[in-house]
Image: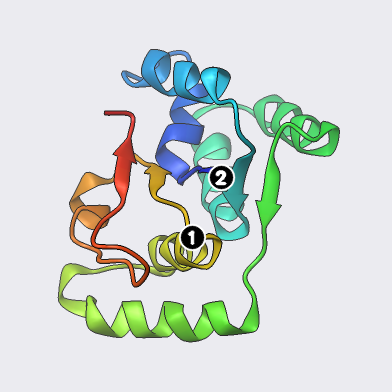
Amino acid sequence: MALILDTGPLYAALDRSDQDHAACRGLVEAADEPLVIPAPVLVELDYWIHRRLNSGVLVALLADIEAGAYVIADLTHPDYTRVRELCDRYADADIGFVDAAVLAIVERLGESKLATLDRRHFGLLRPRHRESIDLLPA
């Protein structure tokens, strides 16, 4: 089992001024399983870090990745098919590439939970491998 991290909780864990910082940092620090970052999340996270924080935060995160604190999950060829399906199926809900990619990785890894602050989108999405996924932090 692993804890897959969407952009919101990962960003909040890095930004001490974020209203969700304590809950998200606690979630990350208390995890006793691999912390998985879907590769597309890194691009979105880079955008927010450069917009609101400073490049030192990104460098520190990359050092943590290099040290093995996080596992990066790249998209596989079948994941792109699933991303397209999700973007098409949920087009009216404005599901974007990153959210669809996160769910595709959750499905591929067979995970039952996801760390996300985006309850609007992920509360709507229905995974293939189970009825729903548990969204953390609770």
Horizontal and vertical percent position of residue 75: 62, 70
**Residue type at mark 1?**
Gly
Residue located 70% across and 45% down the image: 71
Helix, strand or loop status at disc 2: loop
Q: CA distance from mark 1 to mark 2?
A: 8 Å
Q: Is residue 126 above or below residue 51?
A: below
**Residue type at mark 2?**
Met
- Horizontal side of 34 relative to 127 (left or right) equals right
Q: Between residues 95 and 32, which one lies in front from this camera angle? A: 32
Q: Which label sits on residue 43?
A: none
Horizontal and vertical percent position of residue 59: 76, 32
Q: Is residue 120 above or below residue 65?
A: below
Q: Which label sits on residue 1?
A: 2
Residue located 49% across and 23% down the image: 13
Sequence-first disc among 1 and 2? 2
How packed mark 1 is, by other alpha carbons closer than 10 Å (few <14, some 14-19, many 20 or more), is some
Residue located 22% across and 75% down the image: 90
- Identify the colour scheme used: rainbow
Q: Between residues 87 and 109, which one lies in front from this camera angle? A: 109
Q: Is residue 83 above or below residue 31?
A: below
Rendered image quadrant of residue 46 = top right
Q: In the rendered image, which quarter contains the C terminus? A: top left
Residue located 53% across and 18% down the image: 30
Taking the image as drawn, is residue 39 in sight? yes
Taking the image as drawn, is residue 15 in sight? no
Horizontal and vertical percent position of residue 80: 53, 81
Residue placed under numbered mark 1 in the picture:
110
Q: Are marks 1 and 2 in contact (CB under 8 Å)?
A: no
Helix, strand or loop status at disc 1: loop
How packed mark 2 is, by other alpha carbons closer than 10 Å (few <14, some 14-19, many 20 or more), is few
Horizontal and vertical percent position of residue 78: 57, 84
